[in-house]
Image: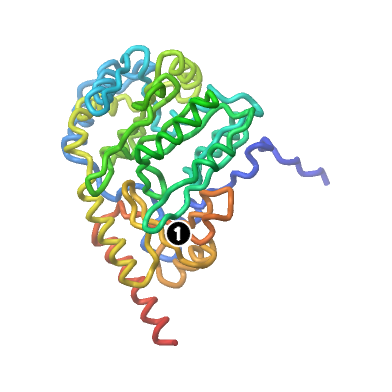
Amino acid sequence: MAELPGPVLVERMRSFGTTIFAEMSALATTTNSVNLGQGFPDTDGPPEVLDAAAAAIRSGHNQYPPGPGIPPLRQAISAHQLRRYGLEYDADTDVLVTAGATEAIAAALLALVEPGDEVVLFEPYYDSYAACVALAGGQRRTVTIERSGDGWTFDPAALERAVGPRTRVLVLNTPHNPTGLVFDQEQLRAVADVALRHDLTVISDEVYEHLIFDGRTHVPIATLPQMKERTITIGSAGKTFSVTGWKVGWACAPAHLLSAVRTVKQFLTYVNGAPFQPAVAEVLGAAERLAPAAALQAQRDLLCAGLAGLGYDVIRPQATYFATVDVGTDAMTFCRGLPHRLGVVAIPSSVFYDSAAGDHYVRFAFCKRPEVLTEALDRLAQGKTRQSTHI
């Protein structure tokens, strides 16, 4: 009998198997559970946004757009950054349209990281970061975002310790997925100080910039002194307008950085989203009005209050789609058992950590209709009732 072939997947990617999202979504289907693991809305975006895309389809925007993105969208992105943050980016040389923020992150890391270089990530981190660092042949170093009372913070000294002689890039995510932390000025200054002192390039993932709660304000790190020249800022229409399937993202950076990102991006998807690009160009100027921050804040409050009322230790987020719960036990075991026990799916936050710091945290998505959140809470309440009955 012929021997079976050895592993065909390159070694640097062998630790990245089936994602926890696929596993938990399959569990949701087989157990008929309410799925609060999926990080996308269960409703469509605003009618103005959808109508703009439909009109673009009907008016012939269905073939390959230009590689960097159509000029009206790049101009709209440039205007958005200037109007909101006072950041000037030339639409022709400093703005690149990508297949979602994930492609922008991948292209930036592939462009900037040589094999053996180190990349600093804040953990918990969006799982794509680790995979993209591995694809580039880099090594990741992590700094833990730690719980601080009702919120989250990090130790600037730990960030300093994470930087070594091979460190080239620091990935920042604010507003932060999954904790919901909105980095404040002091925290941003700590990051900027390290980047400047060690000559690091910062890739700043800001896709949740319009989904912030309680009157807080998002501050791009590129607005801090001397930081624009070394920062690649990444945004997303999918998150802003609740059309995650459109996969329209972008990167903004000075020309010397963006040119490197564009060189790699052209050999990934090349182009995408032909009718969605003019649609986003049309509505981006109304992002503050059309982004569903108020609705999401109400959904956050519904879920967090409900979970707290059931005795869960909830850390209320300042932004994003997610609330974190400290379940006080192994999160992976808890989440794998929850669909069978109570018919609810959540994600163990431990999959977003390199360290054991997240082993008892669980991520619940509240970007779902209120009736879906209420159904999930009702199921969890029934479980609490059964527990108390058996005590």
Q: Nearer the viewer, residue 85 or 101?
A: 85
Quadrant of res 346: bottom left
Q: Residue at (24%, 28%) from the top-left corner? A: 84
Residue 90 sits in quarter:
top left
Please count the marks in the image.
Answer: 1
The amino acid type of the residue labelled 1 equals Val
Residue drawn at 46 percent across, 70 percent down: 340
Q: Position of residue 49 (x, y in %)?
A: 20, 35
Q: Secondary structure at mark 1?
A: strand
According to the picture, the residue beneath numbered tag 1 turns out to be: 362
| Residue lying farthest to the right in this orientation | 1
Q: Residue at x 40, y 33 (%)?
A: 101
Image quadrant assignment for residue 79: top left
The quadrant the C terminus occupies is: bottom left
Badge 1 crowding class, 10 Å Cα cut-off, few under 14, some 14 to 19, many 20 or more, is: many
| Place of residue 324 in the rendered image (x, y in percent of width and height, measured from the top left) | 40, 57
- Residue 351, above or below 103: below
Residue 350 location, x and y as percent? 53, 54
- The chosen color scheme is rainbow
Residue 326 % position (x, y)? 44, 63
Residue closer to the observer: 5 or 129:
129
Is 327 left or right of 239, judged from the image as shown? right
Q: Nearer the viewer, residue 102 or 65?
A: 102
Q: Residue at x 45, y 72 (%)?
A: 341
> In this picture, is 213 found above or below 301?
above
